[in-house]
Image: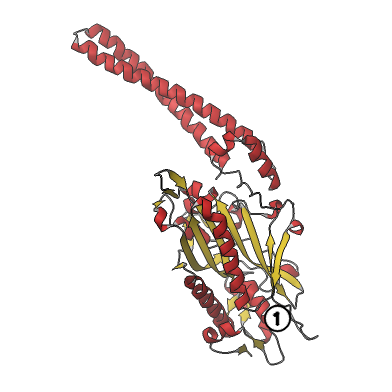
Amino acid sequence: MLQLQVIRQNPGFVKERLAIKNFKDIQLVDEIIGLDDQRKKLQNESDTIQSKINAASKEIGQLMAKGQKEEAEKKKQEVAELKSSLQPAADELNGTEKKLQDLLILLPNLPSDKVPPGKTPADNVVVREGGIKPQLPGDAVPHWELIKKYDIVDFETGAKITGSGFPLYKGKGAKLQRALVQHFLDFNTKAGYTEYLPPLMVNETSARGTGQLPDKEGQMYFMPADNYYMIPTSEVPLTNIYRDEIVKETDLPIKMTGFSPCFRREAGSFGADVRGLNRVHQFDKVEIVQIVQPDKSYTAHEEMVSHVEQLLQTLGLPYRILALCGGDMSFASALTYDFEVFSAAQQKWLEVSSVSNFETFQTNRMKIRFKDGKGKMQLAHSLNGSSLALPRIVACILENNQSTDGIKLPPVLHSYFGDVMIS
């Protein structure tokens, strides 16, 4: 959530940056300032009434001490009248404060000045590419045919058990999932990230804290009986570990990694873009999260991008890194780099990671703070990245490494998988 003082101090700048994100409801900035003016006025009126009550109450005691009971009774009546007007004033103030908060959470984060302009994914900027695109034989097939050939993922039974978009991994397919998760977690913990196994459901406060609510409410699975949400990513529970906490500056940066299944309703249903593992409702992912000092967050962001890039290099997959334009960024992000791997059989790039800096947007919602060296309370910055999302990684490993003998696995997975190929 944007800080109110930032909006008030420079509304023109806020509007300009929101326009970079192609945010349509720019007038909310003026509405927020107007509501805040009203809040201040109501607060002053409430404070004035309370001050009069305090002064009159003190005077009553003085009058009683002097034996001036009649005058004291008049003052008591005055206090009673003031108190009767205080509750309506307080109710109006509370209502205005709620309206203000309800508007504030509708504003997305301001994009960094590093964000390229643009409205669609076509305007994203390729930062760099790595790896070598494989030359596949003429009879190469996409992964949805390979998984049938080697009987490693069963979409039909998954649909019978649950519904479309819930794959059932089996045999070597399940083993490959486990091998990838173990490799990703080991790679992250060796880089100083503490491993967590988080809850798969969060409450409304947690989902609101990281910006999933109200922005992505329609994309989350919700259980109304308990008011819980299935997590779309382990970023949500991991970052909320420190909600409403004042962390020690000496403990920063806080580096966390976690594996979890992820649940998203927006899988889609038609076309090659959603075939096979390209887009599913449930998938496994390993996440990295950092909480850092504000002046170190962009250095941490670059380190996280480098970390994910090195992880991709261990798999030998061709990849590229894109700086997302304003119109393609998430609601909560200030700067995002996407990683895509090249699917040789499909001849297309598939997104497998986003690494984002949220600055104070999430920490302001969650009140994650620290005291700096001068004793001043500050909001920390939060960052997160996929390290990595498995379905499209699996799709590219299968497609890019297919041969007449089977699927040749990246050497880094051999010890985890217990074999060199799927055949």
**Residue 194, above or below 370:** below
- Residue at coordinates 77% horizontally, 74% vertically from top-left? 347
Give the class, few, some or many, for how many residues have Cα within 10 Å of label 1's Cα (few <14, many ≥20): many
Q: Horizontally, is 8 left or right of 317 in the view?
A: left
**Residue 237, above or below 172:** above
- Residue at coordinates 49% horizontally, 66% vertically from top-left? 257
Residue 87 percent location from the top left of the image = 41, 26
**Residue 255, above or below 68:** below
Q: Label 1: which residue?
A: 400
Residue 407 percent location from the top left of the image = 66, 86
From the viewer's side, name the closer residue of 37 and 146: 37
Seen from this angle, which residue lies furthest front? 374
Q: Horizontally, is 75 left or right of 98 in the view?
A: left
Name which quarter of the figure residue 148 lies in: bottom right
In this orientation, does residue 196 appear?
A: no
- Residue at coordinates 59% horizontally, 43% vertically from top-left? 106
Quarter placement of the N terminus: top right
Q: Horizontally, is 109 left or right of 240 in the view?
A: right
Residue 420 percent location from the top left of the image = 59, 89
The amino acid type found where label 1 is placed reads Asn
Which colouring convention does the figure follow? Answer: secondary structure
Residue 280 percent location from the top left of the image = 63, 68
Label 1 SS: helix
**Residue 215, above or below 253:** above
From the viewer's side, name the closer residue of 162 and 256: 256
Quarter placement of the C terminus: bottom right
Seen from this angle, which residue lies furthest bottom? 405
From the viewer's side, name the closer residue of 376 and 22: 376
From the viewer's side, name the closer residue of 243 and 125: 125
